[in-house]
Image (cartoon, helix red, strand yellow):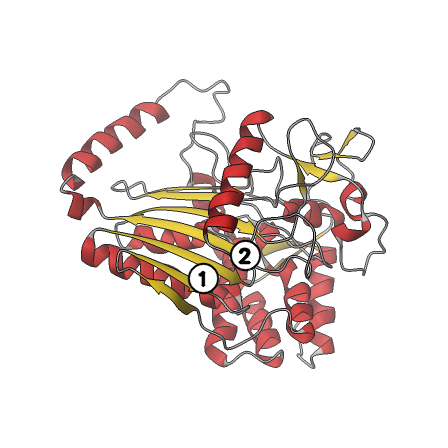
Amino acid sequence: MDRHTGTVAGNGAGGAAAGGADGAGETAGEVEVVPVDLLTATVRDVFAAAGCDATEARRVAADLVGANLTGHDSHGVVRVPLYVQWLRAGHVHAGRSARVVTDGGAFVVLDGDAGLGQTVAAEAVAMGVERARAQGSCIVALRNAGHIGRVGGYVETALSAGLISLHFVNVARSALVAPFGAVERRFSTAPVAIGVPLPGRPLVLDFATSLVAEGKVQVASHGGKPLPPDALISADGERSGDPRVLYGDYAETDLRSAANGTGAIRAFGEHKGSGLALVVELLAGAFTGGGCAGPPGGPPGIANGMLSVYLSPEHFGTREEFERIGREYLDWVLSARPADAAEPVLAPGDPEARTRAARTAGGVPLSAGTWAALRRTAAELGVAVAAAG
């Protein structure tokens, strides 16, 4: 889900299993706290001015601001300048819908035709949910979509319909991550997202297979939360937390481009994350027909691929047992004595829910650089923006 052609923010996700999230609260240093209504209206007006109709502009704004509300700033409004650049350059297009390539009833292949990801991915998810609710299961393969945003949002759509869902995502021709034991890029950040509809405590597991999402590198480069000191690896094998390892030198107002850097993001979990990233590339890229992160050739990486599986416990005849056994097990897992008494064991999705509640009430903290970049983009399109305060 990341691009390496002038990227402004990155990919990634959150919700660590029975632990803390990898994405809640990514701002640091000087921040602007922007009211949710102001931020949403600004992003909506920017995309309307960039050529989207009113419905699509609202959808994109809701998705990006929604990512910020959950604490995943890497998928939030920091993306706006790059999305606008892609629209202007014709890399993605407003007003396009997903096109059916193959329809087998219980499975379908869709082509996004370079439409905005928030539109074509939402259409793919809606189709998968509708068919799984009708027949018990559905597999949807989507290719050639614009950046689809926070994958956890699509998980939440399936959860609201009472469905289990699994999602594997990649970006064609966008290698950013080094395999275990290597220094050269071979994978996209290749996220995985899974939703489990347990009663009263639905689970949203959503993470990049890289040690950090590329968007976190973007956020750090704009003055946000610093990277772990071993998140990146340079061409000579040195581990680093400096975004310039990935992007090369940049001025404050520059769009970040990994094409200018020589280093890579590291895979999480050493060989385990690397192996999972490889499988995600094959499922989301090769199986959908949209393409993997490499080898090089053709236009730079723009297109997301997503393979999604939807399952209805109701149709499988196991909902009662599933909910009883699953909730009993989850409660037992969460009852484990924490290593730090002040930090209870958490379920996937807990940190995001807490952050959403806090930010909805108190506003969205953005790094000063992110808010400034958004205002510059708005001004270029003739969109007036009120002061955050």
- At 69% from the left and 73% from the top, the residue drawn is 89
Quick check: can you spot residue 285?
yes
For label 2, the crowd category at 10 Å Cα-Cα, with few meaning under 14, some 14 to 19 and many 20 or more, is many
- At 65% from the left and 51% from the top, the residue drawn is 174
What is the three-letter code of the residue carrying label 1?
A: Ala
Please provide percent x and percent y for residue 334: 36, 26
Please provide percent x and percent y for residue 199: 25, 42
Marks 1 & 2, CB-CB < 8 Å contact:
yes
Q: Which residue is mark 2?
A: 304
Residue 121's tag is 1
Which image quadrant: the C terminus? Answer: bottom right
Please provide percent x and percent y for residue 175: 66, 46
Nearest-to-viewer mark from 1 and 2:
2
Q: In the structure shown, which secondary structural element does the residue marked by tag 2 occupy?
A: strand
How much space separates mark 1 and mark 2, taking CA atoms?
9 Å
Vertical relation: 53 (above or below) 140 = below
